[in-house]
Image: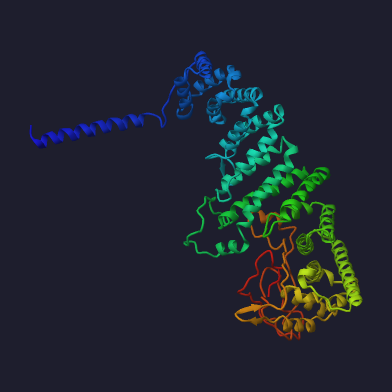
Amino acid sequence: MSVISGQTTTNSILKSSVHSRNSLLANSGSRVRFQLPNSSDIKNVLNGFLKGDHVKQYDEILCTLRDSDLKDEDLFSFIEASRESVSALGRDARSYVEGILKVNWPSQSQNLIKLYQAFVLELLTAHNYHVPMAMEKLINFFYFEGCWSNGKPTEQGLKVFSSVHKLLEKIFTIIPMSCSVFMQVVASSYPYFKKSCEENESYLYNLLLVLDYKHHLRAEVLTLIVNKLIILDVNAPKSDIEDYDVLDDGEEMQYEMETDADDGQTMKHPVANTLDHCMIQLFDFIKNECYENNELNYKKTEKLYKDLIKIFEDVILPTHAVHHVQFIIFYISSFKLVFVEAFLNFLWTKVTNPNAPMVNRQVSICYIASLLARAKFVPLSMMRAMLCEMSNWLQYYIKRQDSVVHSHNSLVKGGASAHGVFYTVAQALFYVIAFRHKDLTNTKKNLIFLQSLNLTKLVTCPLNPLRYCLPIVAQNFAAVTRAEQLVYCYTIMERNERNNMAIMYGEQIVKAHESLDTFFPFDPYILSRSGQVLEDIYLQYESSLSTDNVDFKLSGAPMDEDDFLLDQSLNDSTTTSKKSKSSHKFSYGTSPGFKT
């Protein structure tokens, strides 16, 4: 035989064997099928393993559970046999129990689902040791491939979620201590904030479903959810979201994450998109909890409000750079006037508490100012009452400082570090008056009210609050008070501008005074989907005031934009000019909302 003929024969044999193998693989399933031992064999294997025998057979059962694609009837027989041996499934049989708990049982037939649920309940009742592992495996079903699509669970997802929650409800009833275990496991298993939007949505959806049958866990579950949403929030700053919105379609994104098909409302920033979908679920949960047949259930709303205000105090209020999550308290406050009043009283109590940390007092007054400015549901009478409280507190503070100065024959000292709360309250007062000036100056009665606030004494006091205000707030407040002949601020502002000039020390530039850290938490909500919930209760700024005829310019004062518009058409004598947008922007959360 020639060399050539020999090679041809060898190649043909190899091709034939490869073809046969591929045919076998094509005809077989994607996974190997094994048959589990019968009931008596399982009992013998378990009993023998606990005595040190039948180790090989025990390992074979575990491998079959882990690697095989079991038929429904085989799995049914195996669970039934294991149920008869529940008493033997203690600590030593942990690997065996783990193998059973990993089975994809919610996707099986209803008969198998019922049998599996009964087995797990008997197992956990007999051996509480397995509760944490059982909880972990059940919570893993809060998200799986194909369970979620377009912001809602798929048909398969609904089936799986329903089966899992029925079992969880029964476990909570039979084993009360499982609630604390559940909270520990659900917190540790919560998806990382950079995980897909679908995974975060599905997990949150199932967490909220738990509250349908386990009401006493609501405060804990909502606290966990808010903490996780805050992580999303701080990792999606408004400036970054805006930067993503202006990127070209062909430009590569920073993160690679799965998102829904673009429908015109999908956020381009991946983390913001996840937060947007999660906030929709949270808003829907709040509404469904508070309303029955489109009527507000006051008792249920009051209980939920108390839970949320506690979460607000413990989690949201102390957190820096939160942009959207705080709107949950804004939203529930809109349901009834009593909740707005309660929220304002809660915040004002913190502001006036001298024993509270200064930063907490300052943040609280910022919440008050932002709520009064942005909430359509705050009536004018309530806003006037709050402004009166702020004015009285400021006047009392000034009087007390004057008495100290006179008694010691000294000047007012300390600046923002010593009088930070005073300056923040003063700026809040100026901000609300400037933002809501249309409502506060539309009648003679309202103008008399503004005169009663004694703004002249406040502006001209030795503490000089205009010096520490954001320039944009000071400028717009000055425009309003000049137009209504309440107080003339520009002379003081001009002097402050000269005094605030930076000083060079060697190579360092030192400002003449400390800056006031400002935070306006209810600045525009820019998440596209969930933002629609707030459209009817959120106030956008409208103005007819001009600041163009100011006889000086604030150097270093960034005339930045948010949505606080300055109309250029108040006075006929004022030089008209087109509205223009500044190329420099305030950082959201610190911007009071003015645009120049």
User: Residue 359 at x, y = what percent?
Assistant: 75, 62
User: Residue 184 at x, y = what percent?
Assistant: 65, 39
461 vs 288: above or below: below
Seen as rendered, the residue at the extreme top is: 40
- In the picture, measured across the screen, residue 449 lies left or right of residue 422, that is right
Which residue is located at x 85 percent, y 75 percent? 458
User: Residue 91 at x, y = what percent?
Assistant: 58, 25
Would residue 35 be seen by someone viewing this image from the given angle?
no
Q: Is residue 203 or residue 41 the one in the foreground?
A: 41
Q: Find residue 464 and report its image quarter.
A: bottom right
480 vs 130: above or below: below
Seen as rendered, the residue at the extreme front is: 408
151 vs 511: above or below: above
Q: Find residue 85 and report its image quarter.
A: top right
Q: How many marks?
A: 0
Q: Is residue 296 or residue 519 the one in the foreground?
A: 519
Q: Find residue 173 and report its image quarter.
A: top right
130 vs 195: above or below: above
Scheme of colours in the image: rainbow
User: Residue 448 at x, y = what percent?
Assistant: 91, 73
